[in-house]
Image: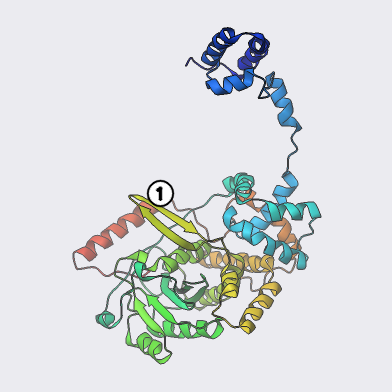
Amino acid sequence: MGKKVSRRVRYELIAVVVERYQRGGREDKTRILDEFARITGYHRKHAIRLLGGHLEAASTDADVATRKASRQRVYDEAFVATLIVFWETADRISGKRLVPLLPLLVSSLERHGRLVLDDATRDKLLQVSAATVDRLLQPARREAAGGRRRRAPSASSLKKRIPVRTSGDVKNPPLGMFEIDLVCHGGETMAGSFLHSLVLTDHATGWTECVPLLVRDSALVVEAIASVRARLPFVIRGLDSDNGSEFINELLMGYCEANSIEFTRSRPYQKNDQAWVEQKNGAIVRKMIGYARYEGLTAAHCFVRFYAALRLYVNFFQPSFKLLEKRRVGARVTKRYSRPATPCERLILSTEIDDATRERLRVIRDQLDPVALLDRIRVEQTNVARLVSGATDLVLAPPTDLDQFVQSLAIAFRGGEVRATHVKRSASVRQHRDTGVLAQTHSRASGRGLSVNC
């Protein structure tokens, strides 16, 4: 096959030889076809269809341009601007997670009077595909940008009394089986006392609760779990922790036995055994709070207000994937996921809750305003960032003008990262942190170091 010529030359060549080819005899057609296929690089069958008049070919590049220009653009700039508002309201989640959430967001924002949509825009929002959403939001994502990381665990003599649960043991767990972990807020040093976040994640639904702890203490862990149990719409059946001393102790074991809660632990240094809660540590706590150091009662009160809004936003308006099936064929692993859904949606569809709880969840969901929640979260993120800089004049209530906040969502991406807690880590800081982690790992391997559960 010869070197392909330009598209314009191919169109001109078709116009010249097509009439000769159709009038010619068998030998003439064979000769013309051989020469035409050699020059254009077309497959012989495709060349036969073109020259035989079975396929319509454009005559010039101008015709191609005219045909392209005649196509109407389905999603204009006004639609993209509206889509950006919904994307910002959902905290910049991916298109695959945003599309299943759009019907809920559209009805919620219209019900609370945050946006007024015409019928055409509403229909487009409800019909747009995830791939199209990602393509339309690509310029906004490019202007915004971002990225982050995490750490390791500890030991105790009580571990022998607690069953080990591995990542391979999780097979369709019932509702209420939680993984728990601590996220430290000590910044670049573990010295002194500082805040920790206790994170609990349910396997079946992805429902996540975060509770701030003033210090890392087993008694505070038990109190935090008790407070979460009181507000959960379903019962806690099991707790799975890492090997930190704040979890592996008589106090928490006694609490679990007294309340008929199954208590298990993961294997030391096996992060994948707690993959669910580890994912939430990064996607929720680190994403929203960052890596700075926080200490004292003022910071603790700020965290309480922050997590009060965040738990509603995450559990009612943040869809997530759920792995349905994983197959291995040789070295190739194929994973199949369910349709993205919020923890609230999965809980409503569950057969393990009663009708009264299901209806109560629907009522709460319909009453919640995602824009108001996001505004509250942004205010508390600003407060948290001000605490890092040493400021004391915190905002205790968000602005009342939510309409202005909604309008700002349309252009927020132009300012880059909107979370006040986000700090872009320099290469030197990352290198220093990685070096410290390597040194700490080497020290543990030598039997001399202590690990810190983060």
Left or right of 346 in this view: 125: right
Above/below status of 213 relative to 381: below
From the top left corner, tell me how far across and down residue 291 is, in percent.
45, 63
Left or right of 183 in this view: 443: left
Residue at 73% across, 51% down: 124
From the top left corner, tell me how far across and down residue 179 is, in percent.
42, 74
* Residue type, label 1: Ala
Residue at 70% across, 48% down: 80
Question: Quarter-wise, where is residue 94 in the image?
Answer: bottom right
The count of marks equals 1
Q: Residues within 10 Å of mark 1 (few under 14, many from 20)?
A: few
From the top left corner, tell me how far across and down residue 338 is, in percent.
53, 61
Closer to us: 199 or 261: 261
Question: Quarter-wise, where is residue 358 in the image?
Answer: bottom right
The quadrant of the image that shows the C terminus is bottom left
Above/below status of 363 relative to 185: below
Scheme of colours in the image: rainbow
Question: Quarter-wise, where is residue 394 in the image?
Answer: bottom right
Residue at 56% across, 8% down: 27
Above/below status of 20 relative to 220: above
Residue closest to the far front: 26
Closer to us: 416 or 123: 123
Residue 410 visible, this orientation: no
Closer to us: 189 or 285: 285
Q: Which residue is mark 1?
A: 427
Closer to us: 344 or 398: 344
